[in-house]
Amino acid sequence: MTGLKKIFAAGVALAAGLALSNAASAATIYGELQADAGEYSPIALGESVALDGCGSSFDSNPNPSVQGTLTSLCNGVTDLAPFDFTWSVYEFDGVATYSFLGYVLEETVSPILTTGGASDLIQAAGTYFLSLNVTLSPSSSTFALPGGNTGAFQPNPGNLSPNSHSAFSNFALIVNPASVPEPAGALLLLPALVYMARRQRKQRSQGQVAS
């Protein structure tokens, strides 16, 4: 065997060895979804807020009563395409009643929620809560995890739907009344008003001297 053939054969053997090693180290990891609708600072009516579902994670322990290793859907799962994100908005009366207002149309992990418009879910100042449901699409049974591993869901007693989870935001989204800015026209007229006041004072003092 010539030197070139030996090098080629060695390369093929090395590639095969790496493939077998990767296949041996990769695994299917079972667990359940944990949704997190996030926390939000107060905004003024008319402002927008970027919702954040990146606290949602894959809990690699299939036991629903025990938390295992959490893998962030945004920073750990390599592809979010198999997942569905459904956001809901509720108005809170401050006592005990939550009124469902509708769904956020942008079904992504971080949609933009606008307020104050005629077609917006939030049209008035008040206290609101957000709900996020994360579900693995029915057409997918697994998803990619770091290190070549595969995430999957294994139903078990007491946790029949581990591939779907809903959660309310931990803190309310406070929408304050819109601030009313100073009219720009008044600021433009201010120099003219000052000039007129000074001129009137001057005319009065001249009239007093003449008398």
Image (cartoon, helix red, strand yellow):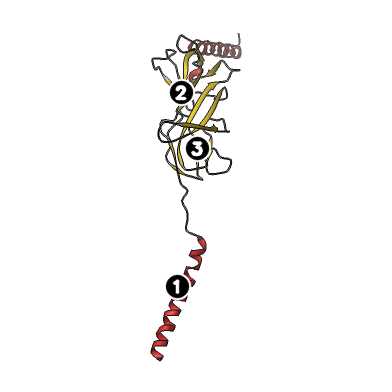
Residue 109 visible somewhere in the drawing: no
Location of residue 72 with respect to 13 vertically, above or below = below
Q: Which residue is mark 3?
A: 50
Figure disc tally? 3
**Residue drawn at point x = 40 percent, y = 84 percent:** 205
Give the amino acid type for the residue marked by disc 2 in the picture. Answer: Ser
- Disc 2 to disc 3: CB gap under 8 Å: no
Q: Residues under labels 2 and 3: Cα distance?
A: 19 Å
* Dot 2 or dot 1, earlier in sequence: 2
Query: Where the N terminus falls, by quadrant?
Result: top right
Q: Nearer the viewer, mark 3 or mark 1?
A: 1
**How far is disc 2 from disc 1 in space, using C-alphas?**
63 Å
Q: Which residue is identified by label 2?
A: 57
Kindly report which numbered mark, 2 or 1, lies closer to the viewer in this rendering: 1
Q: Earlier in the sequence, mark 2 or mark 3?
A: 3
Please report contact status of discs 3 and 1: CB closer than 8 Å, yes or no: no
In the image, farthest residue toward the bottom: 211
* Residue 194: image tag: 1
Q: Report the Cα–Cα distance between label 3 and label 1.
A: 45 Å
Q: Quadrant of the C terminus?
A: bottom left
